[in-house]
Image (cartoon, rainbow, N blue to C red):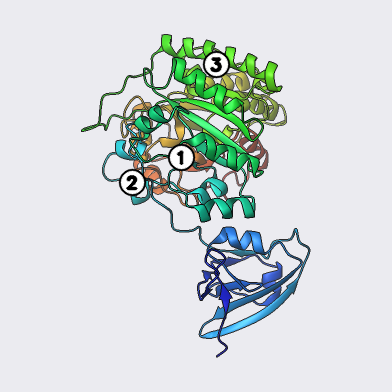
Amino acid sequence: MEAIEVLDPSSGEKSALGLLVKEVIPESPAWDAGIMPGDRLMAINGIVLRDLIDLEFFQSDSDVLIKYKNGNEIRSIEIEKDPDTSLGIVVDPPPIRRCPNDCEFCFVDQMPEGGRKSLYIRDEDYRYSFLYGNFITLTNLTEKDYQRILEQRLSPLYISVHATPLEIRRKILKNEKAPDILPLLKRLSEGGITLHTQIVLTPGVNDMEILDRTWRDLLELYPGVGSLAVVPVGLTAHRKGLPDLPLIGKTYAAKMLRTLAAMQKASLERVGDPFIFPADEWYVISGKSFPSLTRYGSLPQLGNGVGLVPLFQRQWKKGMRSVRRSLPGKFVLATGLAFSPYLQELTELWGKSDLARKDDFMVLPVQNRYLGQTVTVAGLLSARDIIAAAKEARLPKEAILCIPDICLRDGTEILIDDGALTEIAVSTGVKTIVVPSSAREFWFWLKDVSDESPLKEVSA
């Protein structure tokens, strides 16, 4: 058997690590080369692969020498390809690093018992920030981590700043060892890394003067720091043993929107970009109308709930004009309490069109009893709460209960409480399906639904 000699780029020492090949995309370069699921990918061009980020980085050459393990045999193969073409190898994400902080608003500490295990992990991993947009605090990175980020251009990254004054930030994180974040942000941005930042805002802690200073400090680093989202602190009903934190009410939310609008105006005058953005929750809590989508710039923090509602509204109105026939069934759209009024308005708009039937759509607002009534977003709905709402609404047997895909764990049919779609279907007695949570994709899906086989690809 051939011995493999590869170098770990973090230490320069010989190593024999590797990544388990989970899937090989058909007709890809790796597929054509004979690499198969179950093989262990050892090295590319003599460099050991620590995780899928290394795979993405080192496969970008046009000539790629791969060493991999097939059963007990070490094999080598050289692949010539376009530098922009992926090898087509799928591997699992890396084991996640744990968070060293103890924030009083940490959602993990506010979870009820009985959910899936991954929901109780405090994650703080720059690799997941790059891969999936997870927010990190830069409190557990080593010098080698910074070198890797800069060398491999792991951009953009998503950073929870909360406050730039060090003493306030350490108080929020409950971490006396937390470093001063501004030099770290400056180092990354000067190294070509784009940073999207956020403040989880708690009244009396990091608002008013602290918010103003944090905004100004981060604006100084524009365009390296590309955006700043301000998110209201989220509290569940499960805070036993945790300090009391103030709920954000309608008056406070309206005042905060005025403050942030003034900061946006100043940002536009200074750097030509809105830069600072209120999360959609501020408009929901205050009852204020959403601004034009143009106020959100390039939508840099859509995944953080910034601009989701106005984007959905625009895409719904555009998408429904593309459907030129009646819908094949009564679609019951489950959603959280926060979004249900907006979705109701949009379904009523469809109801006024020439092709609409009165019962094409029904909105099912779902109260979150699992996490508590203060949690109103659709993405955190549980199976048990959807079941309860459906039974209370007495859905007709011919109803088609639509669960937005944002409710599900990636790649599964499991919701936050470990309940499954099949459980919802059995308990409610109606057909239950998954639908796209994006309005654009939802209407694309509806256009593809036929009267003859309306749900064959998405039926639970």
Image mark for residue 137: 1
Amino acid residing under circle 1: Thr
In screen coordinates, is 59 left or right of 171? right
320 shown above or below 22: above
**Would you call the spot at circle 3 few (<14 residues within 10 Å), some (14-19), or many (20 or more)?**
some
* Secondary structure type for disc 2: helix
**Would you call the spot at circle 2 few (<14 residues within 10 Å), some (14-19), or many (20 or more)?**
some
Image mark for residue 120: 2
Image mark for residue 203: none
Question: Rounded to the nearest whole Å, what is the CA distance between mark 1 and mark 2?
Answer: 18 Å
Question: Rounded to the nearest whole Å, what is the CA distance between mark 1 and mark 3?
Answer: 23 Å
Amino acid residing under circle 3: Leu
In screen coordinates, is 296 left or right of 386? right
Q: Position of residue 215 (x, y in %)?
A: 54, 23
Q: Kindly indicate the quadrant of the structure image that contains residue 277.
A: top right
* Residue, disc 3: 260
* Secondary structure type for disc 1: loop
Residue situated in front as seen by the camera: 190 or 223:
190
Is there any visible trace of residue 330 in the rendered image? no
42 shown above or below 176: below
**Would you call the spot at circle 1 few (<14 residues within 10 Å), some (14-19), or many (20 or more)?**
many
